């Protein structure tokens, strides 16, 4: 399976989030590295596409730390198996 989303689409998706303005900085803190977030999401999407058994992925939470370090907890939902 090939990746059907590009970096530009992921960036646009980030912009549409209600929390998007928090990526610009909050309470005097520096803004998030949006390019690092998009790169991480691209890698995740590629891994999901390479796996045949995943139907849904949930990211909660997503942390954007200093030096473009992005950490997240990902919950994957496997495809149901056919019962014999």
Image (cartoon, rainbow, N blue to C red):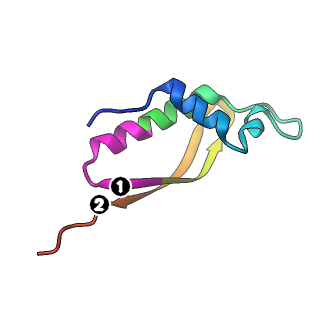
Q: Give the percent coordinates (x, y) of residue 14.
A: 62, 36
Q: Mark 1 — residue?
A: 55
Residue 79's disc is 2
Quadrant of the image for the C terminus? bottom left
Q: Badge 2: few (under 14), some or many (20 or more) residues near its Cα, within 10 Å?
A: few
Q: Badge 1: few (under 14), some or many (20 or more) residues near its Cα, within 10 Å?
A: few
Q: Nearer the viewer, residue 18 or 78?
A: 18
Furthest-left residue in view? 84
Residue 35's disc is none
Q: CA distance from mark 1 to mark 2?
A: 5 Å
Quadrant of the image for the N terminus? top left
Residue at the (53%, 32%) spot, across then down: 10
Q: Is residue 81 above or below residue 13?
A: below
Relative side of 42 to 52, left or right = right
Q: Is residue 18 magenta?
A: no
Image marks 1 and 2: residues in contact by CB distance under 8 Å? yes
Residue at the (35%, 44%) spot, across then down: 48
Q: Give the percent coordinates (x, y) of residue 7.
A: 50, 26
Q: Give the percent coordinates (x, y) of residue 32.
A: 70, 32
Q: Assign a secondary structure to mark 1.
A: strand
Q: Is residue 48 magenta?
A: yes
Quadrant in which residue 15 is drawn: top right
Furthest-bottom residue in view? 84
Residues in magenta, as a range: 44-57
Q: Is residue 71 above or below residue 30?
A: below
């Amino acid at each position: 399976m090939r990746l059907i989303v590009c970096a530009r689409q992921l960036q646009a998706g980030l912009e549409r989030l209600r929390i998007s303005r928090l990526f610009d900085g909050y309470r005097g803190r520096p803004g998030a590295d949006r390019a690092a977030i998009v790169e991480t999401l691209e890698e995740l999407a590629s891994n999901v596409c390479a796996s045949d058994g995943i139907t849904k992925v949930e990211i909660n939470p997503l942390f954007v730390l200093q030096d473009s370090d992005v950490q997240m907890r990902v919950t994957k939902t496997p495809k149901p198996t056919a019962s014999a």
